[in-house]
Amino acid sequence: MVCLGNICRSPLAEGILKSKVNSANILVDSAGTSDFHHGDLPDSRSIQIARKYGINITDQKSRPFKLNDFDIFDIIYVMDKSNFHNITRLARNDFDKQKVKLILSENKSSQITEVPDPYYDSNSGFEKVFKMLDEACEIISIKLNNANK
Ligand code: 4NP
């Protein structure tokens, strides 16, 4: 799960997906395209909204995306087109590039293609982001859990 700062959206996506899949079979992690917040906890508003829905994300620390992530992960979900551009330009080959997907592309019924950056938004922005990610992660988890049966 990748966003810009790895403190608002992608930590939520990581926590939500982890809550829906079998962690013995599926490795879920998150990173930022920047190192602005390297080592920081998720934003307090992300922590709060996750807690509201029974998910604890306080074990996470922001880290920048690294090239090695292309080797470790089969799918790299990005939150918006800017993240998509920043990650695909790091890709070493087409195999890497094909791993990168906009997370909302998994939700065929979503009219919206990008998870908006809630950093400068109010708490309601975080509620909306949580809902979008929860719907997408529900679809992703069904796929992943079926593939790992
Ligand atoms: P995120 O939100 O990419 O969802 O973690 C942001 C967090 C921090 C900044 C930008 C976006 N920032 O510019 O510091």
Image (cartoon, rainbow, N blue to C red):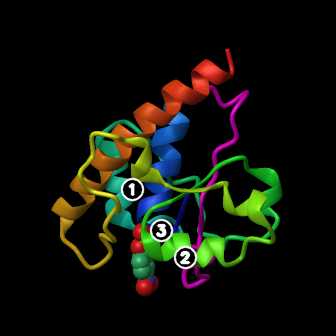
Quarter in which the C terminus is drawn: top right
Task: Indicate which disc residue 7 carries.
Answer: 3
Q: Amino acid at mark 1?
A: Ile
Q: Is residue 84 above or below residue 108?
A: below
Q: Is mark 2 within 8 Å of ligand 1?
A: no
Q: Are the residues flagged by discs 2 and 3 in contact, CB closer than 8 Å?
A: no
Rendering quarter of residue 25: top right
- Residue 55 position, x and y percent, is 42, 40
Which residue does the numbered mark 1 point to in the structure image? Answer: 47
Asked whether residue 4 is in view, the answer is no
Instruction: Determine the CA span between mark 2 and mark 3.
Output: 19 Å
Q: Nearer the viewer, residue 91 or 30?
A: 91
Within 10 angstroms of label 2, few (less than 14), some, or many (20 or more) residues? Answer: few
Q: Which residues are magenta?
A: 21-40
Q: Nearer the viewer, mark 2 or mark 3?
A: 2
In the drawing, what numbered circle is on residue 85?
2
Q: Distance between the Cα atoms at labels 1 and 3?
A: 9 Å
Give the residue type that dot 2 points to: His
Label 3 beta carbon within 8 A of ligand 1: yes
At mark 1, the secondary structure is helix
